[in-house]
Image: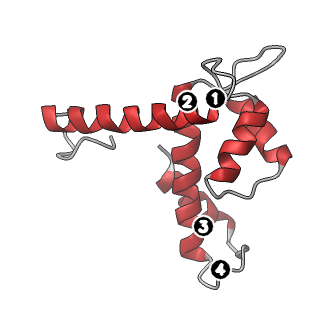
């Protein structure tokens, strides 16, 4: 959907080329944060990545992301596609939050339905 400029559900060659560049940029960023070159991002690597991207999130929230997006295992980790998904969702929801947080206070007061509308309209 990000690269379907016509809204037809199809992607032309230019959209595909843009998608390929987009994925290559994310792969490069992913490899930068995959410090042990395991091909996946661990809890510690995820925390560091999000912090370096400017998100001030608790370890508990990073753990929540990991438990939601990583396959269940003894040492869960995030693959590239899930990393991209997490980052795009965080960026989109952060943008939506900032629209409501006009005073840049870091908190807003929302009605439940306004919250739902904000999330639903930003879901990828």
Q: Nearer the viewer, residue 85 or 122?
A: 85
Determine contact: label 4, label 1, CB under 8 Å. Answer: no
Q: CA distance from mark 4 to mark 3?
A: 10 Å
Numbered disc 1: secondary structure? loop
Numbered disc 3: secondary structure? helix
Residue 9 visible in the current orientation: no
Tell me which numbered mark, 1 or 3, is placed earlier along the sequence: 1
- The residue at which mark 3 appears reads as 97
Q: Of circles 2 and 4, which is in front?
A: 2
Numbered disc 2: secondary structure? helix
Q: Residue at x 71, y 24 (%)?
A: 77
On the image, the x and y values in percent for residue 18 come to: 25, 39
Tell me which numbered mark, 4 or 1, is placed earlier along the sequence: 1
- The residue at which mark 4 appears reads as 104
- The residue at which mark 2 appears reads as 31
Q: Which quadrant of the figure has residue 35? A: top right
Q: Residue at x 53, y 64 (%)?
A: 95
- The residue at which mark 1 appears reads as 34
Q: CA distance from mark 2 to mark 3?
A: 29 Å
Mark 2 surroundings: few (<14), some (14-19) or many (≥20) residues within 10 A: some
């Amino acid at each position: 959907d990000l690269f379907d400029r016509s809204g037809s559900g199809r992607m032309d060659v230019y959209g595909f080329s843009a998608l390929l560049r987009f994925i290559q940029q994310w792969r490069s960023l992913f490899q930068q944060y995959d410090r042990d070159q395991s091909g996946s991002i661990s809890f510690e690597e995820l925390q560091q990545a999000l912090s370096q991207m400017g998100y001030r999130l608790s370890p508990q929230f990073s753990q929540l992301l990991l438990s939601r997006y990583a396959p269940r295992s003894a040492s869960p980790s995030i693959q590239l596609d899930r990393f991209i998904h997490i980052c795009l969702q965080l960026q989109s929801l952060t943008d939506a939050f900032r629209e409501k947080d006009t005073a840049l206070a870091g908190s807003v007061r929302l009605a439940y339905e306004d919250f739902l509308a904000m999330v639903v309209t930003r879901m990828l």
